[in-house]
Every structure is written in C-alpha cells, then in structure tokens.
Image (cartoon, grey):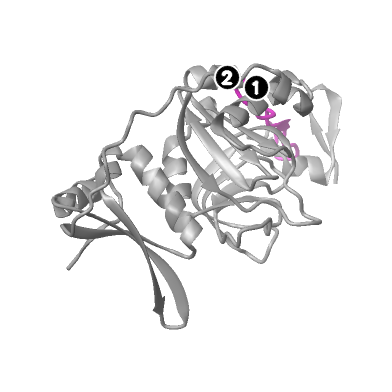
Amino acid sequence: MIAVVPGGLFLGRAERAEAQVLAPTSPALQLLVPLPKPAGPPPVDQVLQSGVLIVVSKASQKMHVFHNGKLWASSPVSTGKRGHSTPAGVFPILQKKTYHRSNLYSNAPMPFMQRLTWGGVAIHAGRLPGYPASHGCIRLPYGFAKSLFALTRAATTTVVVTNEATGSETVAMTLALNAQSGRPAALAAAIPPVAVPSPAPSSPQFAGRGQTIQLAAALSAAEAEARWQSLVSLHPELAGFRKDVVSAVVGSRRYWRLRASAPEAYAMCASLKRSGQDCFNVS
C-alpha cells in the first residue's frame, strides 16, 4: 500500500516507518508527515564555552570529557571490533535512556544509553576487556557511564570520535576542533596546542588508617580506576582520601572493590548517598 501526503509525495513502507501519523481528514485517508531530521551537533568551540565535549580516541581506547572548557574526567573505553568499527566523526546526542536494550544484538542490555546514530551506535555502560570488543558502540565503566549520563544535555553536548591517538587532554581538544573545522587530522601536531587550565593542586592523600568506605565494585582494575577519577572530579574533597582497589572473588566471579579511607570517611559516605552516589561504610 502507498500512502499519499500533502504536496503529492508518495511514501512506501520504509518511509512510513519514519513518518508521523496525523488524524485523518476522512475515514479513507491518513495524512503522513515526515518527522523533522535531528539537528546536527553544536559546534565544538561553542560547547567548549558552555557545554559538554566528549572526545573518543579509537587508537587510544580512551574518552576525554570537557565541561565548560575544562577537563571533567577521562576513562578507558571499548569501541567497535573488527567488522563492526565505530564510525569516526562529529555526532549529537540523539536520545538518552537510563536503561535500554539493543534492537540489533540479542536484546543486549545498554545501561545509561546515549544514542549517537539511528543506525545503532551509542555510548553506554558495558564490559571493558582492554581492547575494541563492541558491535560499534562505545562502552564505558558502569559508574562513569552513570555520571556522564547525568552531565550531558542533547542541546549542549557534542561527541567527537577520532581514529587518532590522544596522549593528553590538549591533543584530544585539538583533534576535536580540527574535526569540526574539517582540517585533516594530520595537522593536529602542527597547530599550536589549545590552552587547557591546569587542575588545582589536590590535597595530599591520607596515609593513616582512619575510616574506610566502599564506593564501587568494578569488573576490572581499570574500571575501578576510571570510577575513582570520575568521583574525584565530581567530589574534589575525595582527592585527600587514600584510595585502595581490593580484588575479591564472590561466587565464581572476580571483582575489584573501590575503597577510600580518611578520618571522617563515614560522614563523607553519608553525604555521597544523599547526592545519589552508592556508598557504604566498611567496618
């Protein structure tokens, strides 16, 4: 069946799937109006002034996140494996869902999903084996994905995926600016580096016994480390705590427990829980 829309446009089955059905003017006719195409991502220089810039390096398997021009946090990632490569380019956030299941790959869970393309590429929490292993998506540690999900807004977030290595946040930012402007990636080394504010010096880490709290149970030591970096970015007072990553086997599975110690750690744990962060006291 072919449907007629205003202006004489004919829509077949595939096009109707992307159209919005309006109230019919008669029982025999339904008017189908194509949905508007999603807007492109905000310019990189704009989100660096006010917004979120996410830079993903497939070569380094790393993500750098900038908030209002300053490095917010970085994390290891797992991008698409051979045959399912994550596309390079500049992307908007098209859709966000706290809990989503893949429409393409066996209903696989995709917590804290942030869609980049309607073809199935998204940022979400998932397993990080230390190499590209996904079907095209960008996997993050669970805790980092949760924090990033809370940070981003579709209208003020731009995602840049690059094939180039990002040895530092300065290189990541420069590559993102080059990608937006259409400059070849090879020019990155020739362009003066972008000034990135240095983080404020952190307090010396607590060295005594004190009180201990647990902040996460990760599936790898790298995921636990990424979670710590994210938490310190969100709660700078944690920088003075002593961090410990403790391996433990529960049942037949190994976990890496992220713990922190300081004289007033229990009070900090209570404050973190009020803000929605998982935490409990360790006796």
Residue 51 in view of the camera: yes
92 up-or-down from 209: above or below: above
Q: Quadrant of residue 2?
A: top right
Residue at 74% across / 56% down in the picture?
81
**Within-10-Å neighbours for mark 1: few <14, some 14–19, many 20+:** many
Question: In the visual, does 25 lie left or right of 195?
Answer: right
Q: x, y percentage for residue 172?
A: 61, 31
Q: Are marks 1 and 2 in contact (CB under 8 Å)?
A: yes
**Which is the main secondary structure of the residues drawn in magenta?**
loop
For the residues labelled 1 and 2, the Cα–Cα distance comes to: 9 Å
Residue 98 to residue 22: above or below: below
Pick the quarter of the image with the C terminus.
bottom left
Q: Residue at x 23, y 53 (%)?
A: 207
The residue at the point 65 percent across, 29 percent down is 38
- Magenta region, residue range: 25-43
Q: Position of residue 26 (x, y in %)?
A: 70, 34
Residue 175 x %, y %: 67, 28
Q: Residue at x 48, y 65 (%)?
A: 219
* 241, 180: nearer the viewer: 241
Q: Is residue 93 magenta?
A: no
Q: Amino acid at mark 2?
A: Val
Rendered position, 23 above or below 269: above
The tally of labels here is 2
Residue under pointer 1: 177
The amino acid on which the numbered mark 1 sits, given as a three-letter code, is Leu
Q: Is residue 202 left or right of residue 50?
A: left
Residue linked to disc 2:
194
